[in-house]
Image (cartoon, rainbow, N blue to C red):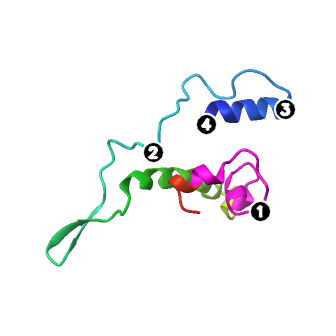
Amino acid sequence: MLRTYTRAINKQQNFSGTLFRKETKAECINCPNDITPSFIRKNGMTLKNIKNPEKQYPQVCFDYIHQNPVKAGLVKSAIGWEFSSAVDFADCRDGKLINKIVAKEYIRY
């Protein structure tokens, strides 16, 4: 995703090179091997509180990224941040950097 984003920005701005620091890394978010699911006790039984654990972590990442400008006090809602894909997912803009078909496999929107 970082490579695709970098190419798009470089093409748009007529730039070349990297956009991120050397320490920036990408991780696969749809294979969360080390995530412990939430558990609840109900009627004396312990149950998983997650229907699809493999789909929970990508949603957490999307929510975190989309809420960053809100938490920083830059906007009142995620769709108020023009640089966010939240605007595209809310159908407020016809964005070209997102693929809603692929995103639907991993997140709810």
Three-letter code, disc 3: Gln
Kindly report the distance in space between the C-alpha atoms of the residues bearing marks 2 and 4: 13 Å
Main secondary structure along the magenta-highlighted residues:
loop
Q: Residue at x 54, y 62 (%)?
A: 108
Q: Looking at the image, tell me whether mark 4 or mark 3 is earlier in sequence order.
A: 4
Q: Which mark is residue 74?
A: none
Q: Is residue 54 left or right of residue 25?
A: left
- Quarter holding the N terminus is top right
* 2 vs 3, front mark: 2
Counting residues from the start of the chain, the first of labels 2 and 4 encountered is: 4
Residue with the mark numbered 4: 1
Q: Position of residue 60 (x, y in %)?
A: 48, 54
Q: Is residue 80 left or right of residue 67?
A: right
- Mark 1 closeness class: few <14, some 14–19, many ≥20 residues within 10 Å: few
Quadrant, the C terminus: bottom right
The magenta span reads 79-103
**Residue, disc 1:** 92
Q: Amino acid at mark 4?
A: Met
Cβ atoms under marks 1 and 3 closer than 8 Å: no
Disc number at residue 30?
2
Q: Residues within 10 Å of mark 2 (few under 14, many from 20)?
A: some
Q: Which residue is mark 3?
A: 13
- The residue at the far front in this view is 101
